[in-house]
Amino acid sequence: MSIRLRRTSMARVVAVCGMPGSGKGEFANVLLSHGIPVLSMGDMVRAEVRRQELEESPGIFGEIAAQLRAEHGEDILAVRLADAVDDHLKSHALVLIEGMRGTAERIVFQQRWQQQFHSLAVDASPETRFERIQNRGRSEDGNREAFEVRDNRERGWGLEQIIAEADFLIDNNVELNEFQAACEQWLTNFTNME
């Protein structure tokens, strides 16, 4: 399926949110396949871990994310990412921010892009998410205890609130091909919205 994006005077920004392992990265991959730029907030944390030459472990990514927020404010990752998003908006009708995790980040994006900004939540049950996390093999993933710690930390940033208040919701308690089809359908509908 090919989706053509019309370049309008009002390019749009979508931020995808969801609990760890819900499918944010898979959603991003669908949009990437259509040439839509994706900027990942998680990649910013992973880059900071590498910059500090820290050993990658399940807890370190959360520690660094929390440290950045404590030292520079809850909105630091959003503030750092916004200029890069604006650069992509000069030549793209749609830009995706992958991994919005808190209310402070959403406020930055809403204030920056106003009606051009939309949020989308990907939802999956804790059991489904944990199984996926165990299968994906990222260095920030760990055992069930680490999974619970991470969920609780991200809830503390307001993640559950922004999921509940998202403009769009895609259920991902389904097989991958069904989820990808739902993402494609959402993209078709979204690009046809005025």
Image (cartoon, rainbow, N blue to C red):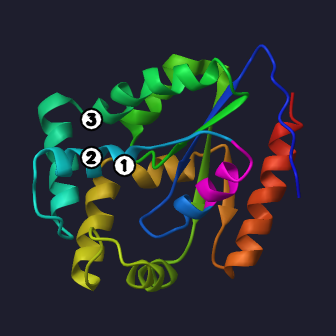
**Residue at 17% across, 66% down:** 59
Residue 17 disc label: none
Verify CB contact (< 8 Å) between mark 1 and mark 3. no
- In the image, 115: left or right of 185? left
Residue 74 disc label: 3
Q: Judge the density around disc 3: few (<14), some (14-19), many (≥20) Cα neighbours within 10 Å.
A: some
Rendering coords of residue 157 (x, y %): 31, 47
64 vs 104, nearest the viewer: 64
Residue under label 2: 47
Q: CA distance from mark 2 to mark 1?
A: 6 Å
Between marks 2 and 3 in the image, the one whose residue lies nearer the viewer: 2
- Dot 1: what SS? helix
29 vs 129, nearest the viewer: 29
Q: Earlier in the sequence, mark 2 or mark 3?
A: 2
Query: Does residue 29 show up magenta in the picture?
Result: yes
Is the magenta region chiefly helix, strand or loop?
helix
- Dot 2: what SS? helix
* Residue type beneath disc 1: Asp
**Residue at 32% across, 43% down:** 44
- Dot 3: what SS? loop
Rendering coords of residue 106 (x, y %): 46, 34
Q: Which residues are magenta?
A: 27-35
24 vs 157, nearest the viewer: 24
Q: CA distance from mark 1 to mark 3?
A: 17 Å
* Residue type beneath disc 2: Ala
Residue under label 1: 43
